[in-house]
Amino acid sequence: MSEVKLFSGTNSLYLANKIADHYGYPLAKQTISHFSDGEMQAVIEESVRGTYCFFIQSTFAPSDNLMELLLMIDAARRASAGYITAVIPYFGYARQDRKDKPRVAIGAKLVANILEAAGVNRIMTMDFHADQVQGFFDIPVDHLQAEIIFIPYLETQDISNVIFAAPDVGSTKRARNYAKYFGADLVICDKERRRANQIESITVIGEVEGRDVILTDDIADTAGTLCRAAEAMIKKGAKSVRAICTHPVLSGNAYENIENSMLDELIVTDTIPLKQASPKIKVLSVAKLFARAIRNTHENRSISALFVRKETNTLFDP
């Protein structure tokens, strides 16, 4: 079987090192250098001929993270790597998955095309903004689900009075999965926007009085939706409100919004590093899950097998 090589982009080293520790292999040697104008150059410092290469890089802002990933992939392809997998815990531009108005780009499809053109053979990611983004690729996509990280954590908490909530209609499927797993009820927030990142109003559909509410979402950007939804829940009589969210983008005034919100806790993963600590934010690591998925990929074993019930607690890495 071909040798495995794990690489990391500059801004995902914090996660890649943890993945490498769980996998049991050190990160391979490479150099990312910069010209005086900011142009990047990726150099792989060891042979990758015929090897399985895994490039770990979340493509959060700035766009340099995506460009760096593309350069690493191109360097490996030109060095005769046997099989190249882009491990993208947070897949940026996934929110641009359709034309919702005239004359707009479908950014998710564009990024998919660019990655394939660079020479990647496989994509491994977590919680696309919309499941259909997988269809933008003509190569295999391993779409990992953060539920396997959040569920064991929630099982350590008192969930006897819990009701799950979708902060918008788009999150209904995700919230329903949690509700079904725990045998809990579900409520939905109907959100109206004026423009991106600016919410006009939120209406709670369902009864939350006296209940402990858990909001579920994939991305917390400015956290405006979560904070407004939490406020709406409390006004309708909810006892407490927490939120679970896979990708902590947390841009703009997000940290201030969370601190001043009705949220008791925001539980996120480390697909994106936090810009600052917050007593209201709890971070769970996805490193063990990605390490196991990488091993299963290399050994031609099932990825979906990781999500059966017996595996869940073994992948929980608090």
Image (cartoon, helix red, strand yellow):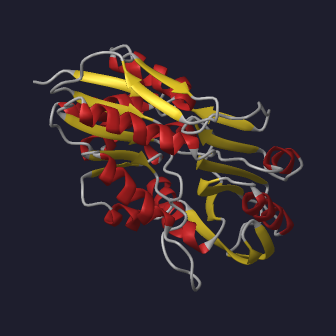
Residue lying farthest right?
A: 260
From this view, report whether residue 134 is shown above or below residue 34: below
Is residue 167 something that shows in the picture?
yes
> Looking at this view, is 201 or 230 the one in front?
201
Residue 73 image offset from top left, x and y in percent: 34, 38
Picture coordinates of residue 185 (x, y %)? 57, 65
Give residue 136's quadrant in the image.
Answer: bottom left
Left or right: 28 as drawn, with respect to 79: right
Residue nearer the viewer, 255 or 243: 255
- What residue is at 61 percent from the left and 54 percent from the top? 219
The image shows a total of numbered marks equal to 0
State the residue lying farthest toward the left. Answer: 1
Instruction: Identify whether 18 is placed above or below 151.
Output: above
Could you tell whether 190 is left or right of 297 in the image?
right
- Quarter of the image where one finds residue 163: bottom right
Q: Position of residue 249 (x, y in %)?
A: 66, 47
> For this view, does 223 lie left or right of residue 166?
right
Q: Quadrant of the C terminus?
A: top right
x 30%, y 15%: residue: 46
Instruction: Tell me where residue 176 appears, x and y as whole percent.
Output: 50, 65
User: Can residue 318 be seen?
Assistant: no
**Image quarter hosting the N terminus:** top left
Q: Residue placed farthest to the front in the image? A: 36
Q: Residue at x 87, y 46 (%)?
A: 256
